[in-house]
Image: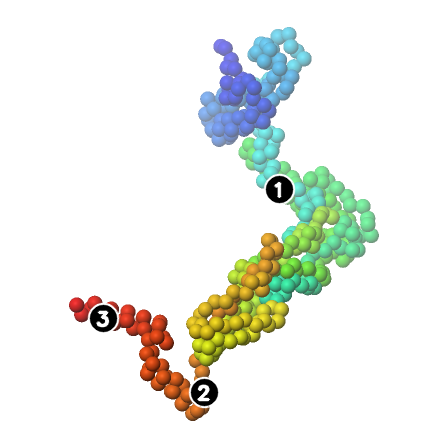
Amino acid sequence: MTKQDYYTILGISKSANDQEIKKSYKKLAMKYHPDRNQGNKNAEKKFKEIKEAYEILIDPQKRATYDQHGHSAFNKGGNYSNYSSFDPNFSNNTDFSDIFGDVFGDIFNNKSSQSQRGSDLQYNMELNLEEAVKGINKEILIATLQKCNSCHGSGSRFGEKINTCQTCNGSGQIHMRQGFFSVQQTCSTCQGQGKIISNPCLHCQGTGRIKQQKKILVKIPPGVDNNDKIKLNNEGEAGKNNGTSGDLYIKIFVKKHPIFQRKGNDLYCEIPINFCMAALGGNIDVPTLNGTIKIKIPPETQSGKLFRIRNKGVNSLRTYQTGDLLCRVMIETPVNLNEQQKQLLQQLNTSLNKHNIASNNPKSKKFFEGVKKFFDDLTR
């Protein structure tokens, strides 16, 4: 009976590379493996063909011979005895760790015996608006795992030699077979470290790291805002087995300001003025983050009018452009009036009514005309 072409069995082209051969084999082996097809003779036969094709095509010399001479190169009695023939006898105990190792090894192999990078840390820093806008240097104190000074991170007392774990041969992992999978588990002898410390350091109990307080000077650049993060390289936790340290992230939180509100790179504030200044105009002092400046209030200014003062906002951390200060004037109604003040206001009110209040209060006139029209329309 004519044997099927190996490339056809694996469903690949004759130009397929090793990666494509392995990928196809893994897929077919998973599908037809006897452990997943109990009692299915056809599946067992198919699996034998797949394994035979794989073992020939994955070997460069065998593949070259097969491409030149076909199946006859590996038949018993052939003239190519320098290559061992494939044994078709199959055992359910076939070791698949070499086949599936690159897939499952990534899942179970944590490389705990090797140097490991330390964890990143985050410190939440609260600033007032002035500090965030102008920048500041702040010293912080954090509790973190640092390299033990007594053993210099080795975990061994007095610098004594560290022995390789004989159970796992230093890998930190042992292999357990479950069906056709080769599963890796943490070595119970060395707890995944891959080494045995006979005389652990008394300060760190053999871990190579010790928790301690650490002072760090943090430079806050001008213009930072809420939720901005500053990264400090290698200021996080020390790594295991003398691995590199993690990073420290400073997260910024800006406290609410009693005067200013920040939106992007602009600052906003409300300025109360009395109605005399609003009507007659004048100059007032308005605050900035660098002192006060004078602005001119024109006559007949209405409540809510916004005045923009250029380049008195926040210097952008990203574009280096400076925002503006926007002042909204709010007309304040006077309270706690004495009798003389009340009389003066009454005289003003009488004068406004006598000399056509509509021309003095155009918004009121427009509003009440709208109200009158609304009710007239209802009664039609």
Q: Would residue 258 be found to the left or right of residue 110 on screen?
A: left
Frontmost of labels 1 and 2 is 2
Q: Which mark is residue 185?
A: 1
> In the image, is residue 55 above or below residue 294?
above
Q: Can residue 191 be seen by looking at this rendering?
A: yes
Give the CA distance from mark 1 to mark 3. 84 Å
Q: Which mark is residue 375?
A: 3
Which residue is nearer to you in this view: 252 or 373?
A: 373
Give, as a three-letter code, the residue at label 3: Phe
Q: In the rendering, at what x and y percent does residue 206 appear?
A: 74, 52
Which numbered disc, 1 or 3, marks the residue that appears first in the sequence? Answer: 1
Give, as a three-letter code, the residue at label 2: Asn
Q: Which residue is mark 2?
A: 336
Q: Residues within 10 Å of mark 1 (few under 14, many from 20)?
A: some
Quarter in which the C terminus is drawn: bottom left
Please, which residue is most extreme toward the bottom here?
339
Quadrant of the rendered image containing residue 163 = top right
Give the CA distance from mark 1 to mark 2. 82 Å
